[in-house]
Image (cartoon, helix red, strand yellow):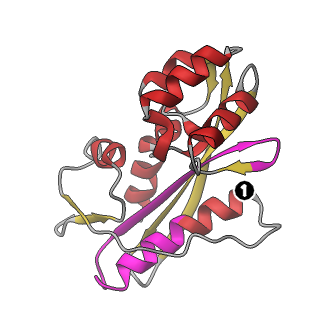
Amino acid sequence: MKEKIILASSSPRRRELISLITDNFEIHTRDVDETIEEGTSPEDAVMLLSLKKAKAVSDLFRGRTVIGADTIVVYDDVILGKPENRENAKEMLSALSGRTHQVLTGVTITDGEKTDTFFVSSEVTFFDLTEDEISAYVQSGEPDDKAGAYAIQGKGSLFVEKINGDYFNIVGFPVSEVNRHLKAF
């Protein structure tokens, strides 16, 4: 690929993970409306969000390959976004305690003419968490900007009993699937 790929994400984790695929990339982002219509499935929601992010940047760079991504946590068919505040983070972590949830990452690759949108799903099971563990974690600030109120690559890893699926998907960028789709693109 001659021209640099554009990653439509300011996430430091995605920046780090795309560098496993290529060093030939740059970052450009635009704000998008992340509202999802009620009744939209989590799978469709995460793909739509990745498409919105990729398309917003692709509109500025016609003909260039743009990758947009979005990650959500789903428990009991409910999407757990980023916590609104620390109390909300505690509620989310309490709900996930001792249970299995899904992490979905939607990815869109587009050049403005052709578009490939897909999602990857992984399962995460948490140990039973005490109120003290949850409170200490929330006070650390790590959950503040994280879907589901935790970061598996950070101190949130201490809550994880097991995972089923792609670890990097849970971090927010399913590297091997993105690489395969890029090669086919």
Q: In front here: 157 or 15?
A: 157
Picture layout, residue 20 above or below residue 50? above
Residue 5, how many percent across, how many down? 26, 64
Residue at the image point whose x is 66% and y is 31% from the top: 93
Q: Is residue 67 magenta?
A: yes
Please indicate, yes or no, whether residue 124 appears anywhere in the rendered image: yes
Q: Which amino acid does label 1 sit on?
A: Pro
**Horizontally, is 68 left or right of 118 in the view?**
left
Compared to residue 16, the image places residue 49 above or below, namely below
x, y percent for residue 50: 52, 65
How many marks do you count on the picture? Answer: 1
Residue appearing at x 36%, y 48% in the figure: 14
In the rendered image, which quarter is residue 27 located in? Answer: bottom left
Which residue, given by chain and number where applicable, does mark 1 sit on? 42
Q: Which of 63 and 43 is in front in this view?
A: 43
Res 102 → quadrant:
top right
- Write the residue at 50% across / 21% down: 157
Q: Does the magenta stretch include residue 94?
A: no
Q: Is residue 152 visible?
A: no
Residue 110 located left or right of residue 135 = left
Around disc 1, counting alpha carbons within 10 Å, would you say few (fewer than 14), some (14 to 19), or many (20 or more)?
many
* Range drawn in magenta: 50-78
